[in-house]
Image: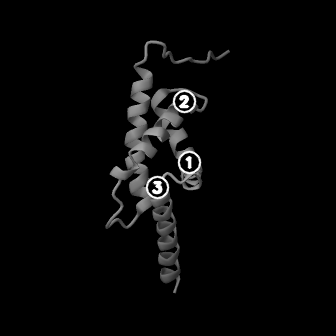
């Protein structure tokens, strides 16, 4: 019984993610906003760890989301058991490229805090 309930929860989450993906593919602003809030914390952790910045690198995160929404049609969720996991892996690649591009800008410097 608990296994059936757990599968139903995962299936509901996957259905919700699939619906958001379809909405994002149609440039539905509400779906894009929900996807943004769903993945923001994940994106923030990735970008902070790859850039070494202590604060949230909003510019990099937003650049990553712009690329994400422009290339959403390239993501294929067919035959995937865990759509959210696959989506995060795909988005992580986009974020890493955005971080690398940001770090190679001539104006980028890591600000280290001095310990007193």
What secondary structure is marked by label 3? loop
- Residue 106: percent from the left, percent from the top? 43, 12
- Residue 4: percent from the left, percent from the top? 48, 83
Local packing at callout 2 (Cα closer than 10 Å; few below 14, some 14-19, many 20+) is few
Distance of mark 2 from mark 1, alpha carbons? Answer: 14 Å
Local packing at callout 1 (Cα closer than 10 Å; few below 14, some 14-19, many 20+) is some
Query: Is 81 located above or below residue 60 in the figure?
Result: below
Q: Which residue is mark 2?
A: 59
- Residue at coordinates 36% horizontally, 61% vertically from top-left? 77
- Residue at coordinates 53% horizontally, 49% vertically from top-left? 39
In the foreground, 116 or 14: 14
**In the visual, does 67 lie left or right of 12?**
left
What secondary structure is marked by label 1? helix
Q: Earlier in the sequence, mark 3 or mark 2?
A: 3
Residue lying furthest bottom in this view? 1
Q: Which residue is mark 1?
A: 36
Quarter-wise, where is residue 81 in the image?
bottom left
Q: Which residue is mark 3?
A: 26
Distance of mark 1 from mark 3, alpha carbons? Answer: 15 Å
- Residue at coordinates 41% horizontally, 61% vertically from top-left? 83
Distance of mark 3 from mark 2, alpha carbons? Answer: 24 Å
- Residue 25: percent from the left, percent from the top? 44, 54
Query: Which marked residue is nearer to the observer: mark 3 or mark 2?
Result: 3
Which quadrant is home to the C terminus? top right
């Amino acid at each position: 019984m608990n296994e059936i309930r757990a599968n139903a929860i995962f299936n509901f989450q996957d259905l919700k993610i699939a619906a958001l993906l379809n909405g994002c593919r149609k440039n539905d602003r509400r779906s894009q906003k929900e996807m943004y809030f769903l993945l923001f914390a994940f994106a923030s952790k990735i970008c902070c760890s790859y850039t070494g910045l202590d604060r949230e690198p909003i510019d990099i995160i937003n650049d990553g989301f712009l690329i994400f929404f422009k290339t959403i049609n390239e993501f294929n969720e067919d035959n995937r058991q865990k759509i959210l996991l696959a989506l995060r892996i795909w988005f992580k690649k986009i974020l890493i490229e955005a971080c690398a591009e940001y770090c190679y800008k001539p104006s980028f410097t890591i600000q280290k805090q001095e310990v007193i």
